[in-house]
């Protein structure tokens, strides 16, 4: 069997390697509805990024080591443990249709520009907060060692105010849940923006220490100065590390690890909440740091090494492909595996072109954080930590109210009911989501049908070849802001338009492309394909280099615009040996058959026969006209490709 995935990538190497076999139990919260919500057109916050990250987790087969849960969305009574009743009531009632009736409330609660009203706003907040609260509840009940909710981490929301794309502060709600069982909780924030909403909520208590590493100075939200250390009982329990533009992996490591070490030594928390905002990555649309994926993940790995109950959350991050890469990679590190750098095929594979790698590289951005500046801030932060009182404790008291989530008895009842309702099923969806593979077992499970139903693509598949795979080495206009080269989608548009098109994946501009191509252009592209492609299907770089500049430009256009019009440029020279990219797609099979002459005139090719023709006449027509029909059908099939 071919050892390639549906994208034609050689899969001789494993998708991941186990690097830490400490058998931590990781609960992973994901709601498939989260990607259906969209703020407003052009808004940088895109919940779709969570769906991209989940797709990578599934197709890297990391899900085998996760307990996957779909948390119950948080309801009004749970949100109002922190937020005011009036604010949550407003979020529950306002919609795009009636928002004009709530103009006064929109101003009062800061809902408008940064935090727009969109369809499903309250449901979106419920999914985000529900995953974080349920993760905290499972940590409390010792049902897991690490809980992950990439839909959470909305750290700007205030008690009665939306802020910075955040409406409901799921982090505060999760910490409140943890405080029911834990004496002290540590909150760490590596988002490029200051975690002002969480700091403000616990600014006067010593039971929660907030530590934020963020850009400070003429930057949203304008808080997080070094001297902001808390007040009253909470004095010295708010830690802020203000940074400047362009901090890189090495510099970040020299401040993050010593500060967290000191926090663990002096505060001794019983649980940790880690906000992993992806806008601190290099090339983020709103961020100004220069961290690579590995530098960002090093923070996650370092916090994991303290072996404390840990809740890992998402946050900012506005270059979708980079955020998805990083969160998927960090999920792998949390379960103790190192993932292969070559991405597996998945339904969002085109987002990661042209290199299709699991990596976000640092750029050559200047680091405005000098060694002296970082050392000065680090020394001041650690000196403040030394001023904290001995490890604070709390008075013993009854644990209030019934905890979130299901009890052991309730879960057992659901398991029994699930088995009774699916007696003839070898493995139910509930059992599949709860199953965890052992890292010391090397034999894969045979539950391929269930995995496929949950978005996992098989590694082995037919090789998909395309003229678009053979990139022009001389093509320019690459968007390098993210650290990952991304082709300009319209061939000659500005980089800003290309970046926006990459984020939204909207190809509306293709509707304006000309619908016809001249015979001269078709002949030139056909000659180019015949010259550049060797017999082995690879690109002969020497021959490609001899092509005139005009031909290279046209090749770039073909690469940058995978439109139906450009698909017509594909020639039989490049198509005769191709299989369909997806064996399960009848449309692709028809295209393959139409693009090449039929092997025999036995009716295998597409037929154009009138219903009124009798069976004997139809068979005779098939024998006579198979080749002709295939030729007639070939051109429209080629033009209909997408």
Image: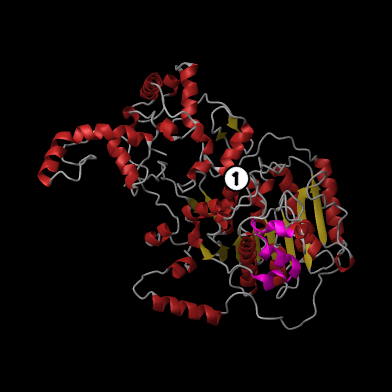
x and y, in percent, of residue 346 in the image: 46, 48
Q: Quadrant of residue 301?
A: bottom right
> Compared with residue 346, is residue 354 higher up or lower down, i.e. above or below?
above
> Of residues 430 and 45, which is closer to you in this image?
45
Describe the element under mark 1 as helix, strand or loop: helix
Residue 66 visible in the displayed image: yes
Foreground residue, 425 or 143? 425
Residue 357, placed above or below residue 79: above
Name the one closer to the observer, 65 or 457: 457
Q: Position of residue 322 (x, y in %)?
A: 60, 45
Q: How dense is the environment of label 1, judged by Cα within 10 Å: few (below 14), some, or many (20 and up)? A: many
Task: State the predominant SS element of the stretch in magenta.
Answer: helix
Q: Residue furthest left?
A: 616
Give the labeled residue for mark 1: 322
Residue at x-position 17% and y-position 34%: 625
Q: Is residue 92 magenta?
A: yes
Position of the C terminus by quadrant: top left
The answer to whether residue 154 of the structure is visible from this angle is no
* Residue 443 x %, y %: 40, 60
Q: Residue, x 36% and y 76% (percent of image)?
A: 423
Part of the protein shown in magenta: 75-102
Q: Position of residue 24 (x, y in %)?
A: 57, 65
Is 43 inside the magenta-drawn segment? no
The residue positioned 59% from the left and 46% from the top of the image is 320
């Amino acid at each position: 069997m071919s050892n390639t995935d549906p994208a034609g990538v050689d899969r001789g190497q494993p998708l991941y390697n186990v690097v830490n076999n400490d058998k931590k139990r990781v609960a992973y919260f994901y709601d498939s509805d989260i990607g259906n919500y969209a703020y407003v057109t052009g808004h940088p916050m895109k919940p779709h990024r969570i769906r991209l990250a989940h797709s990578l987790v599934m197709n890297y087969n990391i899900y085998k080591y996760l307990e996957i849960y779909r948390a119950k969305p948080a309801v009004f009574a749970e949100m109002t443990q922190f937020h005011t009743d009036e604010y949550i009531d407003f979020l529950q009632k306002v919609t795009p249709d009636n928002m004009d009736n709530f103009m006064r409330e929109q101003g009062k609660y800061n809902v408008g520009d940064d935090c727009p009203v969109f369809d499903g706003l309250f449901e979106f907040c419920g999914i985000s907060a529900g995953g974080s609260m349920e993760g905290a509840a499972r940590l409390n009940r010792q049902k897991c060692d690490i809980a992950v909710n990439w839909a959470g981490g909305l750290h700007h929301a205030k008690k009665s105010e939306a802020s910075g794309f955040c409406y409901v502060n799921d982090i505060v709600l999760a910490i409140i849940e943890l405080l029911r069982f834990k004496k002290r909780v540590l909150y760490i924030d590596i988002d490029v923006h200051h975690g002002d909403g969480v700091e403000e909520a616990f600014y006067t208590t010593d039971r929660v220490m907030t530590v934020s590493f963020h850009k400070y100075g003429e930057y949203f939200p304008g808080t997080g100065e070094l001297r902001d250390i808390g007040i009253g009982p909470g004095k010295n329990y708010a830690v802020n590390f203000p940074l400047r533009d362009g901090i890189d992996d090495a510099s970040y490591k020299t401040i993050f690890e010593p500060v967290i070490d000191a926090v663990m030594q002096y505060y001794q928390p019983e649980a940790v909440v880690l906000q992993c905002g992806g806008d601190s990555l290099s090339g983020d649309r709103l961020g100004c740091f220069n961290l690579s994926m590995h530098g960002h993940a090093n923070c996650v790995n370092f916090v994991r090494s303290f072996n404390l109950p840990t809740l890992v959350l998402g946050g900012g991050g506005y270059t979708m492909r980079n955020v998805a890469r990083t969160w998927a990679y960090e999920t792998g590190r949390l379960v103790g595996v190192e993932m292969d750098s070559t991405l597996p095929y998945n339904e969002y594979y085109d987002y990661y072109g042209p290199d299709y790698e699991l990596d976000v590289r640092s750029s050559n951005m200047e680091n405005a954080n000098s060694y002296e500046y970082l050392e000065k801030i680090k020394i001041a932060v650690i000196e403040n930590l030394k001023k904290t009182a001995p490890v604070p404790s709390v008075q013993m008291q009854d644990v209030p109210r019934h905890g979130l989530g299901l009890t052991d008895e309730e879960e057992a009842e659901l398991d029994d009911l699930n088995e009774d309702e699916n007696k003839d099923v070898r493995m139910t969806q509930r059992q599949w989501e709860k199953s965890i593979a052992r890292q010391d077992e090397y034999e894969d499970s045979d539950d391929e049908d269930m995995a496929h139903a949950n978005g996992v693509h098989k590694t082995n598949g037919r090789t998909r070849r395309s003229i678009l795979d053979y990139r022009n080495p001389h093509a320019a206009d690459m968007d390098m802001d993210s650290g990952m080269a991304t082709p300009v989608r319209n061939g000659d548009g500005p980089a800003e338009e290309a970046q926006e098109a990459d984020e939204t994946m909207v190809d509306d501009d293709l509707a304006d492309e000309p619908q016809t191509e001249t015979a001269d252009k078709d002949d030139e592209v056909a000659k180019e394909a015949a010259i550049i492609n060797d017999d082995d299907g690879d690109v002969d770089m020497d021959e490609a280099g001899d092509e005139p500049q005009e031909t290279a430009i046209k090749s770039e256009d073909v690469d940058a615009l995978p439109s139906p019009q450009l698909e017509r440029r594909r020639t039989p020279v490049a198509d005769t040996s191709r299989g369909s990219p997806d064996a399960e797609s009848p449309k692709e099979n028809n295209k393959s058959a139409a693009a090449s002459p039929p092997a025999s005139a036995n009716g295998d090719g597409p037929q154009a026969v009138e219903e009124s023709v009798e069976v004997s006449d139809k068979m005779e027509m098939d024998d006579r006209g198979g080749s002709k029909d295939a030729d007639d059908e070939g051109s429209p099939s080629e033009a209909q490709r997408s």
